[in-house]
Image (cartoon, rainbow, N blue to C red):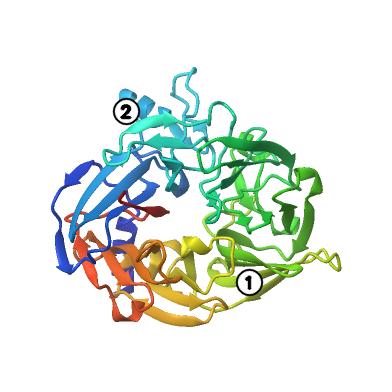
Amino acid sequence: MQHDAITERRNNIAPIPFEADAPFLKIVGELPRELNGTLYRNGPNPQFDSPGAHWFVGDGMLHAFHIENGRASYRNRWVRTPKWLAEHDAGRALFGGFGRKLPDAPANLTDGGVANTNILFHAGKLLALEEAHLPTEIEPGTLATRGYHNYLGRVAGSFTAHPKIDPLTGELVFFGYNAAGPLTPALSYGSIDASGKATRFERFEAPYASMVHDFIVTANHVLFPILPITGSMERAMSGRPPYAWEPDKGAYVGVMKRSGTAKDIVWFRAEACYVFHVMNAWEDGDRIVADVMQFEEAPLFPHPDGRPTDPEKSRARHCRWTFDLSGNTDRFQQTYLDDLTGEFPRIDDRRAGLKSRHGWYACANPKLPMFGALSGIVHVDGNGRRLGHYLLPAGDTISEPVFVERSKDAAEGDGWLLAVIWRARENRSDLAVFNATDIEAGPAALVQLGHRVPDGFHGNWVGAG
């Protein structure tokens, strides 16, 4: 049976070859009447098969579930990046991933990105994000691609898929790695105010070239994790992995005051580890506390010589990082809060950068490879203690859970959790709506799709009005 489950599971990483509209979806149970808006999700869905291409580099496809007055509809569209348009016109793949052109691609072609990792709404704009290019503006509702958004020319180069929105000021804080070009150790850092105006943009050097997927923002600080999935142009030019796991480089985290500059960054050190995603972080006197999903060894990327990393160590667990800002030490503490394998942590975003009392993440079956086996949801308190744990039927998998508050002034955690579930036996997907503080009761409502939504990355809820 396990072999069958693994075979089936692989099918949900494969792309779907179509765009679709489903105006009236079947609902099992009852959708809450207060839930009015759209869940947008993003993930890799290559238009054409490119041999050997990494899962991370497939073309972005957006999936929108619109909920209104107890009804639900669905629409999906590819993000029409310059890369997608060029390949669509050619009728074949032109890139092999991470900007690498295939040998028979036109000489004048430049990498146009994939916009495949996240989608969020800020300052009146819906933005599809990936970490190697500027945000791509998307038309809400239709999902039409409007093109790159560069904030009147004040932002350039790479832009993280994980910017943070300050819940008190509405400011969006962002960074970019490879800021001086592919596989360079430079990072950029900047901010966009609540009206959509770029207020800051600067660059600085990190200890080494690293894949920096996420970063940490508190009320008064920004932290940049430089962890040893390293980038190497020399490897890339010689046909070896451009990104690889090099634990000997160690782990660095740069701490900067939000009111300060890159010159003031203080670098902390720790044992080698990797983190794709941060749950939340906050200040506690002279300390910064950050909750992350930490791997002992990176998954999905090999050693520089091509050897795979250890699957036993390539699973993420909820971990607390603590930084002492009083100057006593340049080491930061790493303390695992649970032994459960998990990823895609989320909070009530109204507590972003502030002490939070609720968090959720997708948990995995430890017997199966990390990312394809996310098969449940965990609800934790502010110290990582489990408050609830829901597991899917065997073989089914789940996406990142997204929290939606019941109302703007509802208490922290009072609302719903939305997650897309793949039903392995039927090979199609449901949108599940959970009561966020009672996930053990299972979904209060299911919105049923006739096809599957492939395993993707991130999404966000945009409320109506």
Image position of 450 (left or right of 248): left
The answer to whether the residues at label 1 and label 2 have Cβ atoms under 8 Å apart is no
Q: Is residue 128 left or right of residue 445?
A: right
Residue 320: image tag: 1
| Badge 1 or badge 2: first in the primary sequence | 2
* Above or below, comparing residue 411 to residue 458 in the picture: below
Residue 238 visible (yes or no):
no
The amino acid at mark 1 is Arg
Q: Is residue 199 left or right of residue 442?
A: right
Number of numbered labels in the structure image: 2
Which residue bears the numbered disc 2? 88
Front of the two marks 1 and 2: 1
Name the residue located 69 percent from the left edge and 44 percent from the top edge.
Answer: 209
Mark 2 closeness class: few <14, some 14–19, many ≥20 residues within 10 Å: some
Looking at the rendering, which quadrant does residue 278 occupy?
bottom right
* Distance in Å between CA atoms under marks 1 and 2: 45 Å
Given residues 268 and 39, the one toward you in this image is 39
Q: Nearer the viewer, residue 421 or 15?
A: 421
Q: Residues within 10 Å of mark 1 (few under 14, many from 20)?
A: many
The quadrant in which residue 10 appears is: bottom left
Helix, strand or loop at mark 2:
helix
Residue 61 % position (x, y): 34, 43
Position in image of residue 337 (x %, y %): 58, 78
Which of the image's four quarters has the N terminus? bottom left
Q: Which mark is residue 369?
A: none
What's the amino acid at mark 2? His
